Amino acid sequence: MAKSKELIYKGHPLRRMDNLIYFGSMADKYIVMLQILSTKKVKDLDVADRVAVQLQLTDPDLKSRDRVVKKTEKDGLYPAMDVAVAWLDRALSQK
Protein backbone atom coordinates (compact mmCIF):
# COMPACT_ATOMS: atom_id res chain seq x y z
CA MET A 1 0.00 0.00 0.00
CA ALA A 2 1.44 3.38 -1.00
CA LYS A 3 1.68 6.08 1.64
CA SER A 4 0.27 9.48 0.77
CA LYS A 5 2.69 12.35 1.08
CA GLU A 6 1.56 14.75 3.75
CA LEU A 7 2.84 18.31 3.88
CA ILE A 8 4.39 19.12 7.26
CA TYR A 9 5.34 22.65 8.35
CA LYS A 10 7.25 23.18 11.60
CA GLY A 11 6.14 19.78 12.89
CA HIS A 12 2.40 20.12 12.13
CA PRO A 13 0.38 18.87 9.15
CA LEU A 14 -0.78 21.41 6.59
CA ARG A 15 -3.79 20.79 4.33
CA ARG A 16 -5.41 23.07 1.76
CA MET A 17 -8.96 22.99 0.44
CA ASP A 18 -9.64 25.82 -2.04
CA ASN A 19 -9.10 29.06 -0.06
CA LEU A 20 -8.89 27.34 3.33
CA ILE A 21 -5.67 26.07 4.88
CA TYR A 22 -5.83 23.85 7.95
CA PHE A 23 -2.70 23.79 10.10
CA GLY A 24 -2.45 21.12 12.79
CA SER A 25 -3.96 17.73 13.48
CA MET A 26 -7.64 17.07 14.22
CA ALA A 27 -6.40 14.55 16.80
CA ASP A 28 -5.03 17.47 18.88
CA LYS A 29 -7.10 19.85 21.00
CA TYR A 30 -6.45 22.85 18.70
CA ILE A 31 -5.94 23.59 15.01
CA VAL A 32 -5.47 26.82 13.07
CA MET A 33 -7.64 27.67 10.09
CA LEU A 34 -6.30 30.19 7.58
CA GLN A 35 -8.75 31.63 5.07
CA ILE A 36 -7.41 33.45 2.02
CA LEU A 37 -9.67 36.48 1.72
CA SER A 38 -8.10 38.10 -1.33
CA THR A 39 -5.31 37.50 -3.81
CA LYS A 40 -3.21 39.64 -6.13
CA LYS A 41 -1.39 38.80 -9.35
CA VAL A 42 2.40 38.59 -9.22
CA LYS A 43 3.53 37.83 -12.75
CA ASP A 44 1.38 34.78 -13.62
CA LEU A 45 0.67 33.63 -10.05
CA ASP A 46 -2.18 34.44 -7.67
CA VAL A 47 -0.58 35.32 -4.32
CA ALA A 48 -2.48 35.59 -1.02
CA ASP A 49 -2.98 39.25 -0.13
CA ARG A 50 -5.24 39.17 2.95
CA VAL A 51 -5.51 36.11 5.20
CA ALA A 52 -7.81 35.52 8.18
CA VAL A 53 -6.29 33.36 10.94
CA GLN A 54 -8.34 31.51 13.58
CA LEU A 55 -7.15 29.32 16.43
CA GLN A 56 -9.94 26.77 16.91
CA LEU A 57 -10.84 23.94 19.26
CA THR A 58 -11.33 20.59 17.51
CA ASP A 59 -14.22 19.50 19.76
CA PRO A 60 -16.96 18.30 17.35
CA ASP A 61 -19.68 18.89 19.99
CA LEU A 62 -19.19 22.68 19.89
CA LYS A 63 -20.88 24.99 17.40
CA SER A 64 -18.48 26.40 14.80
CA ARG A 65 -18.57 29.93 16.25
CA ASP A 66 -17.88 28.56 19.77
CA ARG A 67 -14.76 26.73 18.55
CA VAL A 68 -12.92 29.98 17.75
CA VAL A 69 -10.44 30.87 20.51
CA LYS A 70 -8.49 33.68 18.77
CA LYS A 71 -8.68 35.40 15.41
CA THR A 72 -6.80 38.02 13.43
CA GLU A 73 -6.24 39.17 9.87
CA LYS A 74 -2.81 39.52 8.23
CA ASP A 75 -1.49 40.95 4.97
CA GLY A 76 0.07 37.96 3.23
CA LEU A 77 0.49 34.25 3.86
CA TYR A 78 3.91 34.43 5.53
CA PRO A 79 2.84 36.77 8.38
CA ALA A 80 -0.31 34.65 8.79
CA MET A 81 1.74 31.45 9.07
CA ASP A 82 4.03 33.09 11.65
CA VAL A 83 0.99 33.84 13.83
CA ALA A 84 -0.45 30.36 13.19
CA VAL A 85 2.73 28.60 14.33
CA ALA A 86 3.03 30.72 17.50
CA TRP A 87 -0.64 30.32 18.46
CA LEU A 88 -0.74 26.56 17.81
CA ASP A 89 2.52 25.82 19.61
CA ARG A 90 1.46 27.86 22.65
CA ALA A 91 -2.03 26.34 22.76
CA LEU A 92 -0.77 22.76 22.47
CA SER A 93 1.92 23.28 25.12
CA GLN A 94 -0.62 24.29 27.78
CA LYS A 95 -1.65 21.56 30.17
Image (cartoon, grey):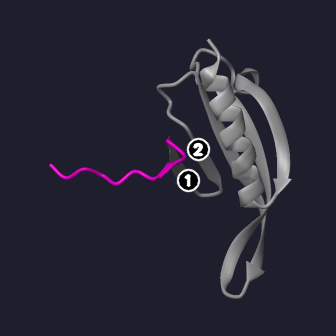
Q: Which residue is mark 2?
A: 22
Q: Which residue sits furthest top?
A: 95
**Above or below for 23 versus 88:** below
Q: Is residue 13 magenta?
A: no
Instruction: Kindly indicate the quadrant of the structure image that contains residue 5.
Output: bottom left
Instruction: Kindly indicate the quadrant of the structure image that contains residue 68.
Output: top right
Q: Residue at x 52, y 25 (%)?
A: 28
Q: Which residue is mark 1?
A: 17
- Give how far across and how far down residue 70 sits, in percent: 79, 30
- Give how far across and how far down residue 71 sits, in percent: 81, 36
Lower position in the chain sequence, tag 1 or tag 2? 1
Task: Please state which of residues 3 and 59 is positioned toward the viewer in this rendering.
Answer: 3
**The residue stretch that appears in magenta:** 1-11
- 24 horizontally vs 3: left or right: right
- Give how far across and how far down residue 6 sits, in percent: 40, 51
Q: CA distance from mark 1 to mark 2?
A: 8 Å
Label at residue 74: none
Residue type highlighted by circle 2 = Tyr
Q: Which residue sits furthest bottom?
A: 43
Q: Residue at x 67, y 25 (%)?
A: 91
Residue type highlighted by circle 1 = Met
Query: Label 2 near label 1: C-beta < 8 Å?
Result: yes
